Amino acid sequence: MKKTETNIAKRGIFSPTITSIHIKWGKKCKILFMNQYSLYVGIGAGICTAISMLPQLVKIIKTRKAEDLSYGMVIILLSGIAGWIWYGILKKDLPIVLTNGFSLIINLLVLFFSIKYKK
């Protein structure tokens, strides 16, 4: 790590809650851009993860069949999603809470309809 990067890291510039107070022209502008960029990447990844089970939910509702769905997988996934929501609440990170909250709802619906239509 370069000497300037060490000084910046010691001052807490890399914290996820960067504000415009920390920003000056030069190398610090790149840090702000990277943090904003990482926020957009995180939101995009969260949306993709949240909607990943949507096709499965639609298929279960349309066909009214859910024979091959693993309940163990859904339970473990729901536990992980609940953990991510808790983590987001603790970190006060709204994108994590919202995307995982949506994912939790979708996966609970998958579990509900798979139980309802299981023969």
Image (cartoon, helix red, strand yellow):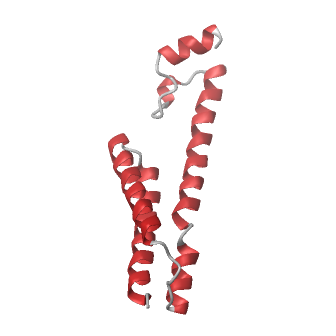
Residue 49 percent coordinates (x, y): 55, 60
Question: Can the viewer see residue 117 in this picture?
Answer: yes
Quadrant placement of the N terminus? top right
Which residue appears at 65% of the width and 11% of the height?
A: 2
Quadrant placement of the C terminus? bottom left
Is 49 rendered above or below residue 30?
A: below
Is 62 rendered above or below residue 46?
A: below
The quadrant holding residue 31 is top right
Residue 11 percent coordinates (x, y): 47, 16
Residue 118 percent coordinates (x, y): 43, 87
Residue 107 percent coordinates (x, y): 44, 70
Which residue appears at 48% of the width and 72% of the height?
A: 70
Of residue 64 and residue 86, the one placed in the foreground of this image is: 64
Of residue 92 and residue 30, the one placed in the foreground of this image is: 92
- Count of marks placed on residues: 0
Of residue 15 and residue 101, the one placed in the foreground of this image is: 101
For the view shown, which residue lies furthest in the top direction?
A: 3
Is 37 rendered above or below residue 5?
A: below
Which residue appears at 55% of the width and 91% of the height?
A: 63
Question: Can the viewer see residue 102 in this picture?
Answer: no
| Left/right of residue 34 with respect to residue 76 in the rendered view | right
